Image: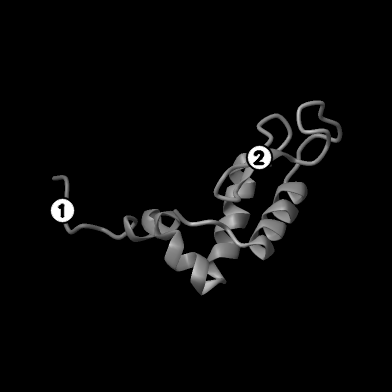
């Protein structure tokens, strides 16, 4: 299993903080995350973080780091499926 290096965890925390939609939260105590799992990934607070925006920001960060992009190819699968498959509905 892949364990996220600390420098990327710090970036994930920054992304989470930047995508908060509430000023105060009693679930995460205003951190934007509730904890870290065994693979060193953040568990984002579902009450105060805009999950879609945070996911998009993380995806952009991963795109710029070749080591992460190789580790998370599933983040970019939807981009390849947007291509037309050559079938028409007549």
Instruction: Name the quadrant containing residue 75.
Output: bottom left
| Residue placed under numbered mark 2 in the picture | 44
- Say which residue appears at 62% left-offset and 56% top-offset: 57
Separation of disc 2 and disc 1 at Cα?
Answer: 40 Å
Q: Residues within 10 Å of mark 1 (few under 14, many from 20)?
A: few
| Residue placed under numbered mark 1 in the picture | 87
Residue 21 picture location, percent across and down:
76, 38
Residue 24 picture location, percent across and down:
86, 32
- Say which residue appears at 72% left-offset and 58% top-offset: 10
- Say which residue appears at 62% left-offset and 40% top-offset: 51
Image quarter where the C terminus lies is top left
Residue 11 picture location, percent across and down:
70, 60
Q: Residues within 10 Å of mark 2 (few under 14, many from 20)?
A: many
Mark closest to the chain's N terminus, 2 or 1 = 2
Q: Residue furthest right?
A: 24
Is residue 47 positioned above or below 60 on the image? above
- Is disc 1 placed on a helix, strand or loop? loop
Compared across the picture, whether 40 is left or right of 20 comes to left
Q: Nearer the viewer, residue 89 or 2?
A: 2
Instruction: Name the quadrant containing residue 86.
Output: bottom left
Q: Nearer the viewer, mark 2 or mark 1?
A: 2
Counting every numbered tag in the picture gives 2
- Say which residue appears at 60% left-offset and 51% top-offset: 40
Q: Nearer the viewer, residue 82 or 34?
A: 34
- Is disc 2 placed on a helix, strand or loop? strand
Compared across the picture, whether 58 is left or right of 1 comes to right
Residue 80 picture location, percent across and down:
34, 60
């Amino acid at each position: 299993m892949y364990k996220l290096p600390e420098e990327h965890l710090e970036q994930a925390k920054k992304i989470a903080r930047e995508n908060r939609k509430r000023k105060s939260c009693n679930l995460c105590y205003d951190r934007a995350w509730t904890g870290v799992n065994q693979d060193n990934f953040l568990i984002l607070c579902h009450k105060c973080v805009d999950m879609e925006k945070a996911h998009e920001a993380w995806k952009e960060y991963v795109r710029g780091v070749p080591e992460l992009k190789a580790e998370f190819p599933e983040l970019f699968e939807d981009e390849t499926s947007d291509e037309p498959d050559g079938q028409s509905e007549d």
